Image: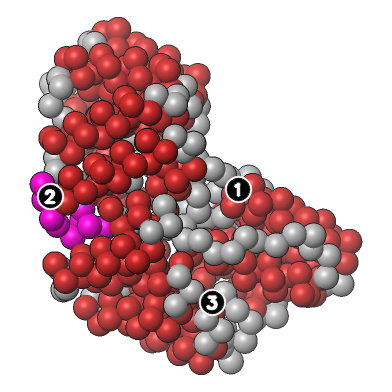
Amino acid sequence: MRFSLETTYHEVPGYRDSLRRRVRSLLAFLRSQSRDDDVAAVKHEFLRRLEPRTASEYLLHADFHRDLKEWRQANADYDTAVGMKPSAEAYFTRGEFYLNSLKNYAKAVRDFDKSLQIDPKPGHRYKRRALAHFCLRHYDKALADISRAIELKPGDGSNLYWIPPELVAKCPEKDFRDGMLKLADEAIKKKDSAYVRYGRARLLSALGQHRLALADYTKAIELEPKKDVHWRHRAEYFINLGRWPEALDDFVKADELEPKYYTRYQHALTALGASNRSAYLSDCRQMLNRFAKSNEANVGHFTVWTCALSAGALDDYSTPIRIAERLVKPDSANAFHRQGLGAILFRAGRFEEARKHLEAATAEEEPARTSAAYAWYFLAMTHHRLGDISQAARALATANRLANKELKDPTKPPAWNRRLTLELLRKEATALIGSARSRVPVVAPRPTAPP
């Protein structure tokens, strides 16, 4: 499907604003359907067809260039927007670009400073500046900004984990670690909510205070027992503690409260981690019974992926293969869906077809919303099944390199489900090919999403 943007009416009053709104709505829909190729196509088309004129248009163009990883053009457009209208929002948006994309923390702090000088009220800007200060080792300033963010928005639990708790735990300054815990306690006193309890639990967990962390996860459930997300968070923490049966029980409770494809996928993955094969096989059947007819791309993908996580999940793979084929367009380079199709074809024993799709998936070094190593592990096993032992060994080496890079990234620790999946796939591929040189570290998960 091709997207084009109408250009005939550019001079009609209100047209440009309307077009921007429509493009944003279209992009939101495409993202919800995991149609990454179309998201990129729309952004490219918009950038090509509509020349920016105002500061807000330059900011939008800059955001799109940023999303497409066109750093130089993004930087130029942010600079133009700030020059045309040096507003609090313009400085803040460029500061986020410096912080998250360019990792230029000094420039990020300068822009956040200017943004807050113009408008000192938004609490979310303080926690972002806190992260930049932390990366510059300005620990006192980082604590001051987190304190201000809590003061302005005490119910925002993310104030307590905006600086990743894993990095807080590794900070060499004990005063900073103690200061974060003190701020977390103060946040609870200001507003004892499930969200803030969750935020403190993440911090306590990273700092090794497991009894207190578990108490906060449990308190969040007591405060909001009808919300499935809190049961999922505690389940994830039970995984961290190696308490697999309790994790499975909490995922079941979450699924009872609000049946979701992602919760059932998490339960299936946890069952594999717990070596509970009967529970995993049951989850695969339930996923197909519940979600096989869904038209939502994410639902289809995770239904397929759940059935591909381990060998012998199904007697008949025709249904998940049909789902996966529906998600992959002939001209698509979407690694997310190609990986799923290749994996399920491998499980079905259709190795030559699997190889074609997995090779297409591995062409993307940093695919969106998935690990590059997944496709390489499946490709390694596919080459082995096809009898190409040297190709299998090379693919396995690449998979291990990518997995190690991801697992050892100190700034972005992978979520528990990614760590566990990498562990399972590496173990399987190593046993099959027999040439792995390293192991995935012990699972030390962090929650997949805030409440």
Q: Is residue 196 toward the left or the right of residue 177 in the image?
A: left
User: x, y percentage for residue 378?
Assistant: 68, 66
- Residue visible at 23% across and 18% down? 115
Q: Which of marks 2 and 1 is in front?
A: 2
Evaluate if marks 2 and 1 touch, with contact meaning CB atoms under 8 Å apart.
Answer: no
Mark nearer the N terminus (3 vs 2): 2
The amino acid type found where label 1 is placed reads Lys
Label 3 crowd bin: few (<14), some (14–19), many (20+), radius 10 Å: many
Q: Position of residue 367 (x, y in %)?
A: 55, 48
> Which numbered dot is residue 408?
1
Residue 144 is one of the magenta-drawn residues: no
Indicate the secondary structure of the residue bearing disc 2: helix
Rendered position, 234 above or below 131: below
Which stretch did the figure color magenta? Answer: 189-198
**Quarter of the image where the C terminus is located:** bottom left
Residue under label 2: 189
Circle 1 residues within 10 Å: few <14, some 14–19, many ≥20: few
Mark closest to the chain's N terminus, 2 or 1: 2
Q: Which residue is drawn at 45% across and 46% down?
A: 169
Per the model, the C-alpha gap separating discs 3 and 1 is 21 Å
The disc placed on residue 282 is: none
Q: Earlier in the sequence, mark 3 or mark 1?
A: 3
Measuring 47% from the left and 88% from the top, which residue is drawn there?
A: 279
Please tell me whether residue 333 is drawn above or below residue 244 in the rendered image. Answer: above
Helix, strand or loop: magenta stretch: helix
Dot 2 alpha-carbon crowd within 10 angstroms: few under 14, some 14 to 19, many 20 or more: few
Report the Cα–Cα distance between label 3 and label 2.
Answer: 37 Å
Residue 55 in view (yes/no): no
Q: Is residue 180 left or right of residue 363?
A: left
Residue 200 image position (x, y, % from top left):
28, 53
